[in-house]
Amino acid sequence: MEMIAEATHVARHEAARAAGAASSAAPEGQAGGEFLTFRLGEEEYGIDILRVQEIRSYEQPTRIANAPAFIKGVVNLRGVIVPIIDLRLKLNCGSAEYNGFTVVIVLNVRGRVVGAVVDSVSDVLELGREHIKPAPELSSQIDAHYITGIGAVKSGSGDDASERMLILMDIEALMSSADMGLMDA
């Protein structure tokens, strides 16, 4: 099943790359495109599908001494040592429980492979420009610098239709921030 999911992802990834070349001139997050959605606590987030390499079940990483709490450690992924970041801890989302739904999103950020622990992966959604609103000015625990916009996603149809909010995140900016210590400046 993992092979099928990875093959489907690769096909979507290549199609999105080809289609996304024309929209790359627009500001990131505002141009629309395909987003992998995931949950952190009660909130739903979306990241550019082109940054996602694969999705894996959570396995206990090897802890690194003196690392911040949000850096869970490292895992060996087919011969590549991958740092594992718990986004729930990094973004102050409360407690981080590890259960059967907990997954690691393996990302390719600036040519480096990094894993991000999330509560669960929801879906891959295509959002047009008209469904993405600019990021609001926030003074909360989440640094609004990493939020590129808010996606409005319709659920259901007819009178039962409702709209849910999807926080669109620039995962590359978050993972390459100085406090993460993962990338050179």
Image (tube, rainbow, N blue to C red):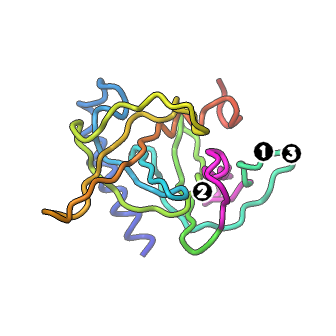
Q: Residue furthest left?
A: 158
- Distance between mark 3 and mark 1 Cα atoms: 7 Å
Looking at numbered disc 2 in the image, what kind of residue is underneath it?
Val
Helix, strand or loop at mark 1:
loop
Query: Which residue range is magenta in the image?
Result: 73-97
Query: Mark 3: few, some, or many residues within 10 Å (few <14, many ≥20)?
Result: few
- In the depicted structure, whether residue 132 falls above or below residue 137: below
Local SS, label 2: strand
Q: Which residue is more in the foreground, 148 or 76?
A: 148
- In the rendered image, residue 16, in percent from the top left (x then y), is placed at 29, 45
Q: Which mark is residue 68?
A: 1
Whether residue 127 can be seen here? yes
Residue on which the image places disc 2: 117
Q: Do the residues labelled 1 and 2 touch (CB within 8 Å)?
A: no
Q: In this view, does 150 lie to the left or right of 128?
A: right
Residues under labels 2 and 3: Cα distance? Answer: 19 Å
Taking 30 as reference, is 92 above or below it? below
For residue 82, say whether it is visible. Answer: no
* Residue 46 is one of the magenta-drawn residues: no
Label 2 environment density (alpha carbons within 10 Å; few <14, some 14–19, many ≥20): many
Reading the chain from its start, which is encountered first: label 1 or label 2?
1
Residue 66: numbered disc? 3
Residue 38 located left or right of residue 152: right
